[in-house]
Image (spheres, rainbow, N blue to C red):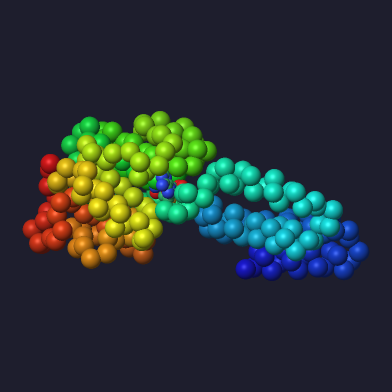
Amino acid sequence: MAAWLLAWGAFAASAAAGAGAGPAFAAAVVVGAAVAATAQGRWRRLLAGAGFPLSALALGALPGMPGWAWLAAAVPLALAYPMKAWRDAPFFPTPADALQGLDGVVALPPGARVLDAGCGLGHGLAALHRLWPAARCEGVEWSAPLAWLAARRCRFARVRRGDMWAGSWAGVDLLYVFQRPESMDRVAARADAEMAPGSWLVSLEFPIAGREALARVGVPGGRPVWVYRVGQSGNSSSNLRPRRR
Ligand SMILES: C[S@@+](CC[C@H](N)C(=O)[O-])C[C@H]1O[C@@H](n2cnc3c(N)ncnc32)[C@H](O)[C@@H]1O
């Protein structure tokens, strides 16, 4: 809010001082960016810095800007982010430390197959690889540019562009999802139908409604990580001990 308000203030002050729309806009972008630079985290900085230019352009602060410029800006967005991907979950990366402690609950043998369904830019894959460097990591992502970038960021993994619902999950030892609450019933049904009993289903943030998790891990104050074993609907406390498959 500070970045946006100060940027708008700078824009109004520059315009009142007689600056043209272009210089006033540039001055305000600089002020907004300077405040945004003090925010913590890349996404916060981006949101804080982009607020003024986007709102100003939408309100017509630069009268010379042609209408088709919005269309041109929308094309890369639509390519990076096809509508189908929105139906399951928009892109949001797994925070680097989000899966901390998961390897204390889930024991995977070397060479185990780990699949991130909807792998985005590969942040989830990287977090999984940190826990199990000897696992065979795979990712599937609907957005072609995101899948391409994930494959380059995660050389250790096999990343393909595709629909996470289309391929088989048979033979996957650990399925990782960071999707949305509405997708979780479908994820659980597919996992139960295709994955071997005793394999692992891990969901960041969203639990499976009506199914008791084997464990909940995650960093304090962060997103919960829900751990399920395929083929087990309820859990006794003895299930909480790490087990090797
Ligand atoms: C919340 S992000 C999670 C990204 C990654 N798993 C991570 O944790 O860092 C959800 C991702 O799922 C992708 N997605 C949504 N629906 C999909 C589908 N049907 N098939 C493949 N990917 C999908 C989105 O494009 C988005 O990148």
Rendered position, 53 above or below 115? below
Q: Is residue 49 left or right of residue 126?
A: right
Quarter in which the C terminus is drawn: top left
Q: Residue at x 69, y 49 (%)?
A: 71
Q: Is residue 133 left or right of residue 18?
A: left
* Residue 142 drawn at (x, y percent): 45, 42
- Figure quadrant of residue 117: top left
* Residue 167 drawn at (x, y percent): 33, 38
Pick the front one: 137 or 127 = 137
* Residue 75 drawn at (x, y percent): 64, 44
Q: Is residue 64 left or right of residue 155?
A: right
Asked if residue 26 shows in the view, the reply is yes
Pick the front one: 220 or 242 = 242
Asked if residue 102 shows in the view, the reply is no
Q: Residue at x 22, y 37 (%)?
A: 171
Q: Residue at x 62, y 68 (%)?
A: 1
* Residue 13 drawn at (x, y percent): 82, 68
- Figure quadrant of residue 8: bottom right
Residue closest to the far right: 18
Q: Is residue 15 left or right of residue 84?
A: right
